[in-house]
Image (spheres, rainbow, N blue to C red):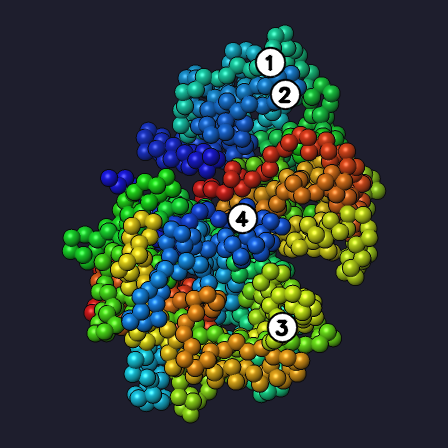
Amino acid sequence: MATIMKKVDAVIVGFGWTGAIMAKELTEAGLNVVALERGPMQDTYPDGNYPQVIDELTYSVRKKLFQDISKETVTIRHSVNDVALPNRQLGAFLPGNGVGGAGLHWSGVHFRVDPIELRMRSHYEERYGKHFIPKDMTIQDFGVSYEELEPFFDYAEKVFGTSGQAWTVNGQLVGEGRGGNPYAPDRSNPFPLEAQKNTVSAQLFQKAATAVGYKPYNLPSANTSGPYTNPYGAQMGPCNFCGFCSGYVCYMYSKASPNVNILPALRQVPNFELRPNSHVLKVNLDNTKSKATGVTYIDAQGRECEQPADLVILGAFQFHNVRLMLLSGIGKPYDPISGEGVVGKNFAYQNMATIKAFFDKDTHTNNFIGAGGNGVAIDDFNADNFDHGPHGFVGGSPMWVNQAGSRPIAGTSNPPGTPAWGSAWKRATADYYTHQVSMDAHGAHQSYRGNYLDLDPVYHDAYGLPLLRMTFDWQENDIKMNRFMVEKMGKIAEAMNPKAIAVLGKKVGEHFNTASYQTTHLNGGAIMGTDPKTSALNRYLQCWDVHNVFVPGASAFPQGLGYNPTGLVAALTYWSARAIREQYLKNPGPLVQA
Amino acid sequence: MKARVIASFAASLALLGNCSVSAADADLIKQGEYLARAGDCVACHTAKGGKPFAGGLPMETPIGVIYSTNITPDKTGLGAYSFADFDKAVRHGVAKSGSTLYPAMPYPSYARVSESDMQALYAYFMKGVEPVAQENRASDIPWPLSMRWPLAAWRWMFAPPVADTPEVAGADPVISRGAYLVEGLGHCGACHTPRALTMQEKALSAADGSAFLSGSAPLEGWIAKSLRGDHKDGLGSWSEEQLVQFLKTGRSDRSAVFGGMSDVVVHSMQYMSQDDLTAIARYLKSLPAMDPQNPPHQYDKQVAEALWKGDDSRPGASVYIDNCAACHRTDGHGYTRVFPALAGNPVVQTADATSLINIVLNGGTLPATHTAPSTFTMPAFAWRLSDQEVADVVSFVRGSWGNKGAAVKASDVADLRKNDMHTTSGDDLGQVTQPH
């Protein structure tokens, strides 16, 4: 028998970025809000205490801040013809856990979006014709434009305390020769903080990229270039380039997180409650199945509880949102054979390539320092900033040096041909540890008919509920784009005049490898759009079928971006919250008529 | 816990607002609530986890533990108190029963409170506070020390007469207001003025002598530092604006609240009006320095330059680099409003280094305030640094960048470590407070 909790106006599932933003927005609107976070309470103190947090074994190797997959994991297969097996060791992606979620352990690269990527299908059809997009590629438009989102990007940057250099502000050129990105869309304000200083490796990339004819710019970073106070009164310290960002709690209060940037303000309001260790099992629907009545969760004492609410926000990680919808019977599950249904559809990722350049001992790159959001990038091959016509693939890729700090256990790389152990390895490590530059092509990833999410028919979690099943593999378009990007990035690497180069790109016929880390930028599965036949959510992230359920997060992206997703996730969440505050609360019901 | 205190204030006020309280009464109660905050009555009259103003907080005195009293309008509290009874207790130090209060109750300071403010406080405690039935707890002081008549003698000797202070012609009204708050309800001297052997504050007002607010001996592990005009260890280097910012938010450009003052900011000062904070700051800034020479801080760049070059040969320098410099920086300037400056900071240069040693050993959390909700925690280093290392780094901080604090010894650290001070943690300090 579930314990029935006192009804609230809104219940939020998950307390990462989207949960925190929604909590702030909805409490500002006067709602009583409860956030249920699956994992434990976490904060800079005590979880980020210096120097205990500078512990690569605990955090990176033993994955302290990540999901406990002994309780719940995903099963993975490459195609519908394979049998999916549980992912028993986190590798390719690292979903967060606990208060702050992935927003506590992220790096801090804080982009907006290239405007064309919000209207991917329309743009490609307009420029390259209807037949350019491969038949099984299911890319779609988001249903919202950059211009509509601009104020929300702007506000999110102010909340995050983002460092960067604008190119134009209200049409006025301000960033030329100062590290601005000429491909960046117009902005209504400069970045709240000036760009961070560049590491030697980023400077080498900048010089080489310029020599090759590209247009390098400073990465926008949610690691602070100086002390900062955000619109909520929350304060940040300055980043000191300690190099412990991704996978760690920032001890300097300098990496934006829900914990540092939003939670302090929420603690001041009486109409908000955060319940950690509260694992939501499903959203409860009324008998019409068109309205949610609340959620059922297991509390810290292991009791089953029901939290009634008028409004349900699914703010969990991308694939948890999708799984909760499937477990709750919200929206029609996607069927890859017929192509019908929407929940689980358009599951997409990031298409990475990496090149490492190794130098003689007179080039000092000090790889032990770094900041997760810091670096120098080019957008010459991102989005549709070049003519895709002759190359026959869809999608683009920013390229960068993002020196995030090479830590002693995992952070060492040696030139190709170096043994993986023994005295030769030791010698090479001593020779190259501080004399190398690593650069990435952070490729966009498209959605395809055969890459999708559904409930696994065999495997269950610790609560007896089916695991989520990923059916995912690289497609021809992905490999083509990846190889193109490696070639272009290789020119920059060569222009640095290194002693040796190592290339980590995709080979023809390569399959998805769950063991090697390839970002935690998983997208889609509960996508937004303009048509309930092809999307699970409307343009305000509201479920088409259940109007009082909103699902912010990268699960709403119809395909992956070239940029890192957090900036768009945050902006879309503020956009959705505005619609809830200004439209939905006054007249609860569908915000878009199907 | 404190959050609930404040929430229930609001709730009880709202409750009473709906009953038979007239608008004039409501204004008076509201004024009384404000004054009760100025006096931080809640700090002593509420036990940890207890109901607001119901008393029961244990307080160590040299002769034994005493417990604060119930001052809610219940019959176990102030229920039967007339205004005259209330006034007699608050300003004269005499309970309704006729016995003299322990001077843990700062009635020598409250003697300064005006008649009209007393009326407002009375209205608040009788009509604006939720009654709580909770019997007062007798002290643990053994006979014969528990006899109260010596307290009466103490009172006759040291408590000033109660009379509204006459306005001084030509005095700055802002400074006069500041004096009224600091010397009166604020009872700042209770911690910040040194006490004589007989435990009375050595001065109760600016006019009473230069000992007033000149800093205390260690109290619960912290030094309540001098608030006078000395640059080295007083407020000489602070601007009026920085003081206002500090009292309102717990932080200024170059400093952050810690120790016992955290509670004062969270429960009292942050509620003060801008005008009253300005008055307090201007008055404090009007107090002359104890040291007639009083040289301003001269920044010395030698240490920063040495550290910048990788020279950590100075004792304590390497401990500083490894543990402190990320936030407080090699130049000792910290970061504006986030990580306090150590260079020129009077807190690190007090004659007695107890506060600095304590904060290195146990860390501290900057409390959340309504207008500055971020809590910054300096981690504890007791588990990591030996007595000698703490002594070295404290001495390094006290003697670098132009600072003039004397070196400390490992034995000083050992003594404080033995005291087993609890860390000022974010768990009970203003992490959850209600907005007003």
- What is the three-letter code of the residue carrying label 2? Thr
Q: Is residue A583 left or right of residue B13?
A: left
Identify the subunit bearing mark 4. Answer: A
Decide if residue B134 is on the left or right side of residue B343.
left
Can you tell which quarter of the image residue B63 is in? top right
Q: How many residues crowd around disc 3 within 10 Å: few (fewer than 14), some, or many (20 or more)?
A: some
- Chain letter for mark 1, please: B
Count every numbered label the image shows and give the total. Answer: 4
**Chain letter of the residue beneath label 2 in the structure image:** B
Mark 4 vs 3, N-terminal side = 4
Q: Which badge, 2 or 1, comes first in the chain's sequence?
A: 2
Up/down of A587 relative to A366, above or below: above
Q: Residues within 10 Å of mark 2 (few under 14, many from 20)?
A: few
Q: Residue at x 41, y 58 (%)?
A: A88
Report if the CB atoms under discs 2 and 1 are less than 8 Å apart. Answer: yes
SS at mark 3 in the image: loop
Callout 4: helix, strand or loop? Answer: helix
In which quadrant of the rendered image does the C terminus of chain A lie? bottom left
- Report the front residue among A126 and B337: A126
Q: Which residue is mark 3?
A: A418
Residue A384: percent from the left, percent from the top?
A: 43, 83
Q: Residue at x 44, y 56 (%)?
A: A96
**Residue picked out by circle 1:** B141
